[in-house]
Image: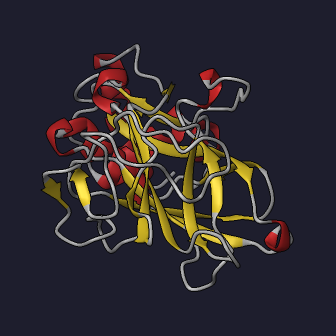
Amino acid sequence: MSKRIKGSLRALLALLLLCPALRAQTVQILPAQDNTLFQPDTLGDRSSGAGPQVFAGRVGGVGGAVGLRRGVLAFDVAAAVPAGSTILAATLTLTCSHAPVFDRTNTRTHRLRRATAGWGESGSDAGINNGSGAAPAPGDATWSHTFHPGSFWSSAGGDFAGTVSSSVGVTNTGTYVFPSTPQLVADVQSMLDAPGGNFGWVLSGEEAVSGTARAFDSREAPAYPLYGGVAPVLAVTYVQGVPSLGAGSLALLVGLALGGGALLLGRRG
């Protein structure tokens, strides 16, 4: 066994003696709020804070709504994960409840980016499969507003980071999981450590092609009359009370916490 692995094992043993109950845990978090930003057309500003669906992508068709749709979703990570924990993994599961008839065989990439400004969910309700949205209620987010009617995004369509946190291809209706990535994990860690800056994510679809928008069940979907959808779920895996470690020891700890310790311990140096 190499000196490096022996050193990591000694560090891990010391850590386990100090924290005998250390183990990975996973919690499932429902959204604290969600909404859709509808790019204005002849109907003006629109929203759907209380509606059963969140839209993302570009709509367009003869006699129908036109323009971009972006979802916004926020989760109260600090209320569900103990302060001081280290996030190991995070995934977001969404249920696609509607796809355009003529685009259901095409896979459209949907992306999550960290929102950088606060926004609101209020009483507007577009109903089911209505990509046109509804008139915003006071406090609703819209394409122009963070909180209608008096507060605005710095950039119309939402303020968000340029880096994609996670992405998934969406074809027809069904369940889709945005996989855990280093950026998504970093997002969730920041949401835990600095909850005042937790504004969730902006969800976008393929915005260059009309007729590609998808609808996803919102947090209101399970209780919406005659709908019974499935709310989004953020699954977060974490460990509590991890002190500052070297890179080798932390990698070994994470491997052990996720069940891979035997593979590491079986290596020969």
Q: How many marks?
A: 0
Quadrant location of residue 107? bottom right
Kindly give the residue lying farthest to the top in the view shown: 21
Residue 236 screen position, x and y as percent: 47, 35
Q: Is residue 64 visible?
A: yes
| Location of residue 93 with respect to 57 vertically, above or below | above
| Location of residue 92 with respect to 240 vertically, above or below | below
Q: What residue is shown at x 59% (from left), y 32% (from top)?
A: 231
Q: What residue is shown at x 28% (from left), y 28% (from top)?
A: 78
In the figure, is residue 146 to the left or right of 210?
left
Report the quarter where the C terminus lies: bottom right
Residue 87 screen position, x and y as percent: 38, 39
| Location of residue 140 with respect to 60 vertically, above or below | above
Q: Is residue 10 visible?
A: no
Q: 54 or 11, which lies in front?
A: 54
Q: What residue is shown at x 27% (from left), y 71% (from top)?
A: 156
Quadrant location of residue 144? bottom left
Q: 75 or 40, which lies in front?
A: 40
Residue 56 screen position, x and y as percent: 55, 62
In the figure, is residue 166 to the left or right of 224?
left
Q: What residue is shown at x 44% (from left), y 33% (from top)?
A: 31
Residue 214 screen position, x and y as percent: 66, 60
In the figure, is residue 115 to the left or right of 25?
left
In the figure, is residue 161 to the left or right of 262?
left
